[in-house]
Image (tube, grey):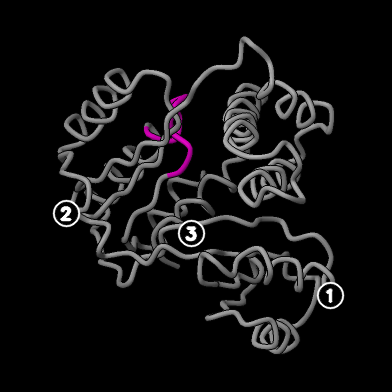
């Protein structure tokens, strides 16, 4: 398993405490409010908002919390958040992309830079590592919704570009501009997906030894813990032994 998917599975195995879940809900709400403010407050008419709402549902965010975040966008006290992307190199030379929503660009940039520096990595210019990734849409389903063959057939019929199926579920990759229509087609056949999002998918991955791998995973953890950070992606592979150690 590669990159952000491997890191995501490690974090899922660790489980989430109430404090971590509260932080997650705050990040989801921030994205919902921003999406609603930038477009119409109706998920059916606003692709970014629909994606944000689906992500919140997948994490079992309460319905009233989702509705409150949408309504907040039209309020006079609604914060103004800016989309910012940071790119850099983590331990072992691993390429890392950090997506943020921030109301203070200087604070966020300083914090992200400090996290890279403390890990032995370094922040780089925008565009320095993003060419190593494909910016694509992804639709995810639990493994139990259908067989790998059924998912592949449905994904091809819907116009998807690639499908990866395994014990952890099905991941269907699409072009960004086709994400909404393909997600809708697959939802009609398999039910609501557990995730619909735009992601940075590594074109290739690099193996990292356990020493650098542990430092890298700690860096990704620190970044994900930051209130302004929405998503983190990286192009790495680590050993099963380190995955077990970090999941303990």
Which of the marked residues, 3 or 1, is nearer the chain's N terminus?
3
Start-end of magenta stretch: 223-231
* Viewer-proximal residue among 213 and 80: 80
Which of the marked residues, 3 or 2, is nearer the chain's N terminus?
3
Query: Residue drawn 16% across and 54% down?
Result: 93
Tell me: 110 left or right of 65.
left
Tell me: 191 left or right of 13.
right
| Relative to 131, residue 58 above or below | above
Indicate which disc residue 189 carries. 1
**Callouts 3 and 1 close, C-beta under 8 Å:** no
Which of the marked residues, 2 or 1, is nearer the chain's N terminus?
2
Q: Is residue 90 visible?
A: no
x%, y% of residue 189? 84, 75
x%, y% of residue 245? 43, 48
Mark 3 packing: few (<14 Cα in 10 Å), some, or many (20+)?
Answer: some
Mark 2 to mark 1 CA distance (whole Å): 42 Å
Query: Residue drawn 17% across and 53% down?
Result: 128
Mark 3 to mark 2 CA distance (whole Å): 18 Å
Query: Does 50 lie within the magenta span?
Result: no
Closer mark to the observer between disc 3 and disc 1: 1
Q: Is residue 45 visible?
A: yes
- Classify mark 2: helix, strand or loop: helix
x%, y% of residue 221? 41, 37
In the picture of the structure, the residue carrying the numbered disc 2 is 93
């Amino acid at each position: 398993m590669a990159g952000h998917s491997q890191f995501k599975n490690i974090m899922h195995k660790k489980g989430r405490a109430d404090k971590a879940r509260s932080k997650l809900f705050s990040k989801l709400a921030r994205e919902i409010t921003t999406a609603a403010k930038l477009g119409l407050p109706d998920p059916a008419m606003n692709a970014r908002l629909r994606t944000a709402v689906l992500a919140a549902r997948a994490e079992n965010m309460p319905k009233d919390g989702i509705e409150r975040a949408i309504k907040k966008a039209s309020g006079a006290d609604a914060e103004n958040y800016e989309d910012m992307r940071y790119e850099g190199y983590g331990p072992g030379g691993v390429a890392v992309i950090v997506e943020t929503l921030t109301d203070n660009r200087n604070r966020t940039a300083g914090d992200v830079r400090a996290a890279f520096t403390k890990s032995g990595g370094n922040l780089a210019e925008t565009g320095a590592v993003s060419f190593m990734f494909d910016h694509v849409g992804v639709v995810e389903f639990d493994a139990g919704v259908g067989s790998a063959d059924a998912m592949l057939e449905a994904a091809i019929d819907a116009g998807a570009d690639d499908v990866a199926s395994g014990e952890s579920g099905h991941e269907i990759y699409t072009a960004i501009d086709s994400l909404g229509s393909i997600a809708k087609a697959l939802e009609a056949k398999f039910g609501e997906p557990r995730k619909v999002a735009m992601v940075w998918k590594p074109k290739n991955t690099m193996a990292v030894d356990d020493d650098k791998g542990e430092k890298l995973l700690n860096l990704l953890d620190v970044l994900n813990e930051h209130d302004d950070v929405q998503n983190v992606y990286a192009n790495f592979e680590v050993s099963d032994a380190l995955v077990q150690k970090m999941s303990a």
